[in-house]
Amino acid sequence: MALLELKGVVAGYGPAVALHKINLSLEQGQRVSLLGANGAGKSSIVNVISGLLPIRSGEVWFEGERIDGRPAYRVVERGIAQIPEGRLIFPKMSVWENLELGSTALRDKEVKDVLLKQVFDLFPRLAERRKQLAGTMSGGEQQMLAVGRAMMSRPKLILSDEISMGLAPLVVRDIYDTLLRINQEWGVTLLMVEQEARLALEVADTCYLLESGTIVASGPAEEMARSEVVRKVYLAED
Ligand code: ATP
């Protein structure tokens, strides 16, 4: 059974249709990236899964249960966390308070403490700055915080949207390395939206290519990196 499955999902904004009958399937432990130009519908897919964008038709299944139509907080409770585009950390709250907010779906204080320790192990920088107001940290540190906050809900699936946006390449590399650790050591499945095509193909094992709200190609990331359309259009190779 797939961990996550989208079946014929149609969604949009007002009269505009952003996703046309999307079919997508993720196995537990997979690392999948969504590739596509601006406006192709990558964020819309992520927002459909997390319950932020309602669907017009189709179905979304997670661990054998239908989750479309559920409010976003219920989706988090089921084990899906989002690292949103633009990070959306709470700037006037401390690092620690931001992390706490990530775990509101959990009740057990001991579990929260264990998670907090794990997040601080993954990102020692956050531990050092736990009392600092989040809005005063660097962009890279804020992105680490957004990843840590997602981890605090003890997710089975993490949806990430444009992690690299506005950050220096080395910082981006560092954050993706940590996400790969989260995938490999904790078995968390990843669905990543990434504008940087090279990176998207490198960090994922499987890649979907989106154009104008339709999936036009998908397959193992290595094969996709060799395909003509990806090389010409997204990697700008001859
Ligand atoms: P980007 O990389 O630029 O974020 P994307 O592939 O993530 O692009 P989406 O953000 O999913 O694409 O957008 C898909 C389509 O839906 C686009 O045509 C976009 O203009 C439209 N769209 C997205 N959000 C809204 C909104 N809140 N209201 C109206 N239209 C929207």
Image: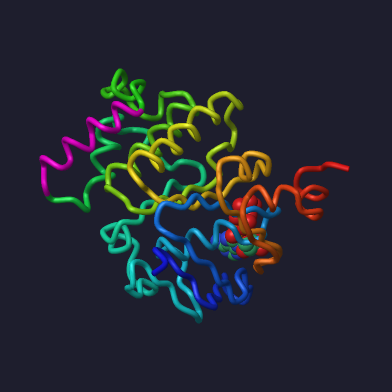
Is residue 119 left or right of 137 when viewed as pictured? Answer: left
Q: Is residue 133 above or below residue 9?
A: above
Highlighted magenta segment, given as a residue range: 108-122
**Residue 177 or residue 66, whichever sits in front:** 177
| Residue drawn at the location 62% of the way across and 39% of the way down | 199
Q: Is residue 106 above or below residue 23?
A: above
Image quadrant occupied by the C terminus: top right
Image quadrant occupied by the N terminus: bottom left
Give the image's coloring scheme: rainbow
Q: Is residue 135 above or below residue 214?
A: above
Q: Residue 123 sits in which quadrant?
A: top left
| Residue drawn at the location 64% of the way across and 53% of the way down | 35
Q: Residue furthest right?
A: 238
Q: Residue furthest bottom?
A: 57
Q: Position of residue 223 (x, y in %)?
A: 69, 52
| Image mark count | 0
Q: Is residue 114 magenta?
A: yes
Is residue 114 left or right of 14 when viewed as pictured? Answer: left
**Residue 71 or residue 171, whichever sits in front:** 171
Of the four image quadrants, the one with ligand 1 is bottom right
Q: Residue 200 sits in which quadrant?
A: top right
Q: Position of residue 236 (x, y in %)?
A: 81, 42
Q: Position of residue 28 (x, y in %)?
A: 40, 57
Q: Is residue 45 above or below residue 170?
A: below
Q: Position of residue 60 (x, y in %)?
A: 43, 72
